[in-house]
Image (cartoon, rainbow, N blue to C red):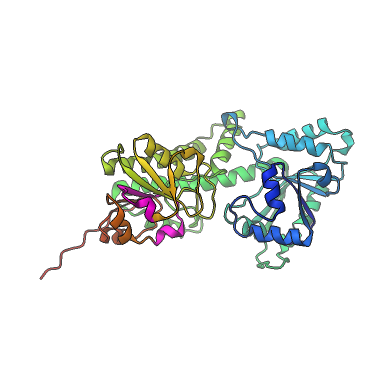
Amino acid sequence: MLGNEVAVIEVDRARLEALRAGSVPFHEPDLEPLIGSGLAAGTLSFTDDYSRAIPSAEIVFMCVGTPSGAHGRPDLGFVRAAVREIARQVDGNETIVTKSTVPIGTRDWLADLLESELATPADRPAVVSNPEFLREGRAVADFLHPHRVILGSNDEMALDLVEQLYRPILEQSFPGGDGRRPALVRTDNPTAETIKYAANAFLATKISFINEISTICEAVGADVEAVALAIGMDPRIGPEFLAAGPGWGGSCFGKDIDALVSTATEHGVEAQLLQATRDVNLRQRERVVDRVRRELHGLLGRRIAVLGVAFKPGTDDVRDSPAVHVAERLREGGATVVAHDPIVRRVPELGDVEITDTVTAAVDRADAVVIMTDWPDYAGLDLAQVASVMRGDLIVDTRNQLDAEAVEAAGLRYAGTGRPAPTPRRALEL
């Protein structure tokens, strides 16, 4: 699409075969057509052979996973394995770009590892840090239309090379460019690495903040929706990430906060705010479980429908999903949990929890319905139908998607997040 030839290395055989066939082995809108067009044009190829991809490359993007390891530090096992394979193929003319979220200071470790693995030390390639800020479910759009591009290195020639690669995106000169030019930030490696962690930590903190405010709102009878709307009008705050709910999840926020706290601890810094952000998030999930338990006067023998399993809409990712956490805790309390999700069909962590094909099947004979993921499907629930098949009457709307009065009008009890109960209608005076 941007005029480059790209060879992708994938060592998982099943995924490799799927990609070669033009199929994406995970849910990401708009990605499959791009892969199909690249394969058809012959500008995109997939291989598991480093020797076929590296020697002809000018730039090598390292995009391997860095899951959480001991004490919150990212596990660099996949990075280490990839670097060793890369080192066997480079001749010093390549530039390695780290897209993986790596600990601050990884560039020096990476350079030392490369040098130890190279046949000739003079062949050591330059290393540029280029953190990604792609949202699952919007990754293609975020890549093509970013707010900013971060490049970190002390090698100016390497920075120039990678900047040139990004030129069509920076200028929005490709077909479909929207004219809104993203900012370019050129800095050193540790600063670029810190920017990634700081950005995710700030967003997670903003969510935990509004969730703590939602708890106060419930206590004093205020409406967190109105509070969030009003404070978001302040340009210093902004409206994004101020939706109260069951807390954040996914593969990034928790892992990145743990890594940043771990790095701070190693350098003698106590990251109290970041630790509180994590604690508030976990407590928010437990508040959902406690509310269901309180409203039902216990969980033992109850049947509960959980709507939404993915950690957010637009993806099939269930890693650190609040819905999975809540479903597990409800089961531990003795409830039978039945779930529904528009995309997710299986969650190994939930074992025997049935994931139904329809919402109606999930809520059938339920004592309570808990909306955990803000899929658009759930905002338009047929509340009369839900009420007709439920055994109980409790709707716990952790995402504040439903109209509280409409829920009550259907004969159901409404429990939102940080929202007061509907005001009882006055009887008509004759």
Between residues 320 and 259, which one lies in front from this camera angle? Answer: 320
Note whether residue 397 is visible.
no
Note whether residue 28 is visible.
yes
The magenta segment is 360-380
Image quadrant containing the N terminus: bottom right
Q: Does residue 240 sit above or below 302 in this rendering?
A: below
Between residues 401 and 191, which one lies in front from this camera angle? Answer: 401
At horizontal 76% and vertical 43% (from top left) the residue drawn is 48
Residue 152 is inside the magenta segment: no
Residue 372 is inside the magenta segment: yes
The x and y percentages for residue 17 are: 70, 48
Q: Does residue 379 sit above or below 51 in this rendering?
A: below
The x and y percentages for residue 101 are: 65, 42
* Left or right relative to 390: residue 156: right
Using the rendered view, name the quadrant where residue 107 is placed.
top right
At horizontal 65% and vertical 40% (from top left) the residue drawn is 65
Image quadrant containing the C terminus: bottom left
